Amino acid sequence: GLSLWKNALVGQSMKKIFNGVQVNRQLQWLGIGGNPLGPEGAKEVATGLQNNFSLQWLAMGGCDIGDTGCTWLATALKDDGCDLQSIGLGGNGITAKGMKDISRALWNNTRLESVGLGGNYLDSEAMEHFAEALKDNKSIKKAILSSNLLDDQAIAILVEGLGRNDSLETLLL
C-alpha cells in the first residue's frame, strides 16, 4: 500500500500518482486523505480509477471534494474498469446532491463492498438516494454513515431500504 495522508497534494499530484498506479499493478491500497484535493483532485482520481485493475482500497477522507467531486468519482464507480472494493469519503462536505451521484453509481457497481461516508452533511434526502441504491446493489457489505445529519426520518428511510437488501452486513451510524 501507499499512504500519502495529510501532505500538500493537490489535483495535479493525483494525475502523477495515478500514472504510477497504472504502471505498478501490485498496488492495492492508496491512502490520500487529508490533502486539499478539492473537486479537481477528485476528477483526477476518477480518471485514474478508470481502467485500473489493481487498486482495491482508496481512502480519501477530508479532501474537500464536495458534491462536485462526488459527481466525478461516481463516473469512475460506474465504469467496469474500476476494481475498487472499498472507498472512504468521510469528511468531504458531501450533501444529498453528492450522495445522489454516488448512489446512482452504486446501482450498477458490483465490486464495491465498503463505502465510508461518515462526517459529511447527509440528511433524510441523502438517505432516500442511498436507500434506493441499497435496494438494487448486492455487493455492499459495509456502510459507514456516522457523524452526519441523520434524524429519525433519515433512519426510517434507511431502514426501509435495508428491508430490500440482503448483502449489507455492517452499518455504522
Image: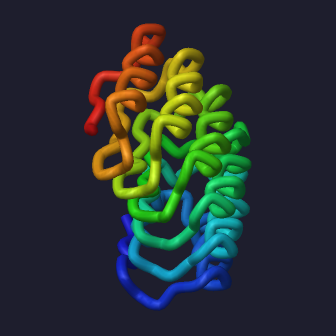
Q: Which colour scheme is used?
A: rainbow
Residue extending farthest to the bottom is 8
Provide residue 12's location: percent of width, then percent of height: 67, 84
Provide residue 155's location: percent of width, then percent of height: 35, 28
Q: Residue at x 61, y 51 (%)?
A: 98
Left or right of 133? Residue 48 is right
Left or right of 91? Residue 170 is left
Whether residue 7 can be seen here = yes
Q: Is residue 44 above or below residue 121?
A: below
Q: Residue at x 64, y 40 (%)?
A: 100
Left or right of 100? Residue 31 is left
For the residue pair 136 and 155, the one nearer the viewer reads as 155
Quarter containing the C terminus: top left
Provide residue 101's location: percent of width, then percent of height: 67, 44
Quarter containing the N terminus: bottom left
Whether residue 29 can be seen here = no
Q: Which residue is drawn at 40% across and 28% down?
A: 153
Q: Which residue is drawn at 51% across and 22% down?
A: 134
Left or right of 151? Residue 80 is right
Quarter of the image for residue 66 reads bottom right
Q: Is residue 88 above or below residue 84?
A: below
